[in-house]
Image (cartoon, rainbow, N blue to C red):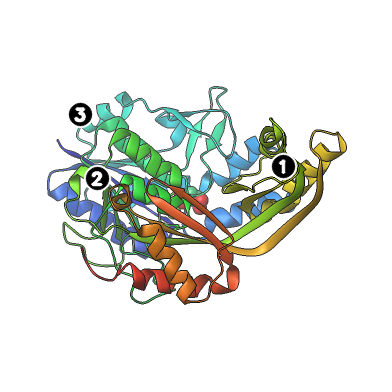
């Protein structure tokens, strides 16, 4: 029988009523002839509550016990979903990660999926079970301890199951009705996309469009799993939501398909660094060792053997970055006059696979910001993305102006 993976996020299983609604939707697919693997999140707010309890007891908690606690939210919804389906006469049973068993690395609270054996679940499908309800976000380490995949990890569970079982599609039910050209809270001209390419979704996901966990999109791209993002709060037709797919499946596309933003960025500048071979390595190795996620990097032209080096990183990593750089200076590994942090910046990015073949996108972006009187502090580009750092107070204005300039409210 053809197989579908359906994933329900926390708001879609927030209470018994919503679990019933979600189960009904599963029932519709079963009636069409699909076997279904349902992946569930914890009820909305539950994971935060569990995390809070652990942190209240001990800031230096044992990560293995943290995972034992926070994985329980999904265990509850998996069982409740199975009971609800059985109540509707749909043959279903629940599976916790370790029962599958979904094997992960031992990196507690940030584990990676290593293997999903299909025999156990397939054997049950063979015996007439129509729905396997699997607790998302969790697995088991080679040492036999419960692990979790990082916040938002149920998306990744869903895509991994779709890949392992060769599902026709992976439907992600959430509280928004698809992927938008930008955040609809910033401009009401934001438009829902019918389709978006994996590469574009990856850029938007990692840039802070919080619809899907970034790793789930990476995985979907690697295994060519077609993902559909749709709302569990509306009646759905067969082509509802946004399909995230290979770019070959997309016939028409705008040059720019999305404007993403990230509010909590910081810009750090090392002033007057001795410019010699190995200096970038000397700066960025301690930052990487300290776990700082450096994003944009700019090195100025050097004068008299000295240069400025600027980089961006998340705001909440500034203290860590400062500590690592000052320690490296003390040890004599780097030599700079001053270290300046600007924590009032935001990053705005224009994303689109059409940029590969069309020029002028950067120029249009810079002209638009100029016309609004917005100063650009740092620029970086990739094949399908242009990002700028600007003052945070202009973030909304920049997103609106760029959305207009690239006419994202209009279909290609
Ligand atoms: N319940 C987990 C979280 O809130 C995992 C998930 O929902 O994807 O992060
Ligand atoms: Mg989520």
The reply to whether callout 2 and callout 1 are in contact (CB within 8 Å) is: no
Ligand 2 closer than 8 Å to label 2 CB: no
Q: Is residue 168 above or below residue 401?
A: above
Q: In the figure, is residue 203 to the left or right of 408?
A: right
Distance Cα–Cα, label 2 vs label 1: 44 Å
- Residue underneath mark 2: 247
Distance Cα–Cα, label 3 vs label 1: 43 Å
Work out which quarter of the rendered image holds the C terminus and state it.
bottom left
* Residue in front for this viewpoint, 122 or 338: 338
Question: Image point 30% across, 24% down: which residue?
Answer: 119
Q: In the figure, is residue 140 to the left or right of 54?
A: left
Distance Cα–Cα, label 2 vs label 3: 35 Å
Residue mark closest to the camera, 2 vs 3: 2
The reply to whether callout 3 and callout 1 are in contact (CB within 8 Å) is: no
Indicate the position of residue 195 as horizontal and vertical percent values: 24, 55
Name the N-terminal-most of marks 2 and 3. 3
Indicate the position of residue 50 as horizontal and vertical percent values: 60, 52
Q: In the figure, is residue 260 to the left or right of 234?
A: right
Indicate the position of residue 180 as horizontal and vertical percent values: 34, 63
- Residue underneath mark 1: 61
Q: Is residue 23 above or below residue 221?
A: below
Work out which quarter of the rendered image holds the N terminus and state it.
top left
* Whether residue 48 can be seen here: yes
- Residue underneath mark 3: 126
The total of numbered circles placed on residues is 3
Name the N-terminal-most of marks 3 and 1. 1
Dot 3, crowdedness within 10 Å: few (<14), some or many (≥20)? few
Q: Is residue 287 above or below residue 359?
A: above
Indicate the position of residue 259 as horizontal and vertical percent values: 40, 62
């Amino acid at each position: 029988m053809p197989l579908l993976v359906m994933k329900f996020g926390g708001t879609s299983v927030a209470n018994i009523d919503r679990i019933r609604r979600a189960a009904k939707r599963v029932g519709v697919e079963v009636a069409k002839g699909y076997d279904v693997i349902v992946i569930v999140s914890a009820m909305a707010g539950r994971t935060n509550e569990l995390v809070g309890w652990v942190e209240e007891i001990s800031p230096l908690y044992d990560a293995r016990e943290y995972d034992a606690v926070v994985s329980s939210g999904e265990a509850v919804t998996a069982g409740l979903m199975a009971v609800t389906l059985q109540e509707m006469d749909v043959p279903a049973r629940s599976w916790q990660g370790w029962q599958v068993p979904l094997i992960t690395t031992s990196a507690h609270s940030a584990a990676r999926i290593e293997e999903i054996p299909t025999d156990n679940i397939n054997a049950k499908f063979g015996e007439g079970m129509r729905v396997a309800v699997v607790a998302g976000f969790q697995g088991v380490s080679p040492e036999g301890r419960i692990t979790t995949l990082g916040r938002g990890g149920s998306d990744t569970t869903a895509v991994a199951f779709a890949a392992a079982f060769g599902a026709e599609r992976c439907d992600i039910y959430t509280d928004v009705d698809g992927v938008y050209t930008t955040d609809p809270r910033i401009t009401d001209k934001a438009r829902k996309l019918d389709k978006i390419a994996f590469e574009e979704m990856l850029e938007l996901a990692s840039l802070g469009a919080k619809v899907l966990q970034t790793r789930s999109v990476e995985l979907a791209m690697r295994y060519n799993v077609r993902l559909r993002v749709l709302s569990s709060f509306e009646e759905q037709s067969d082509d509802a939501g946004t399909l995230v797919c290979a770019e070959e499946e997309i016939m028409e596309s705008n040059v720019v398909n999305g404007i993403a933003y990230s509010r909590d960025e910081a810009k750090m500048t090392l002033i007057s660094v001795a410019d010699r071979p190995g200096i970038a390595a000397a700066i960025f190795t301690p930052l990487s060792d300290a776990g700082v996620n450096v994003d944009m990097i700019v090195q100025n032209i050097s004068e008299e053997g000295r240069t400025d080096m600027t980089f961006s990183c998340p705001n909440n990593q500034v203290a860590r970055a400062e500590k690592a750089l000052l320690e490296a200076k003390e040890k004599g590994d780097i030599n700079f006059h001053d270290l300046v942090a600007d924590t009032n910046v935001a990053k705005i990015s224009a994303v689109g696979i059409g940029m590969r073949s069309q020029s002028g996108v950067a120029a249009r972006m810079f002209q638009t910001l100029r016309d609004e009187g917005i100063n650009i502090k740092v620029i970086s580009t990739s094949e399908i993305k242009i990002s700028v750092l600007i003052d945070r107070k202009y973030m909304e204005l920049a997103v609106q102006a760029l959305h207009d300039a690239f006419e994202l409210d209009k279909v290609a």
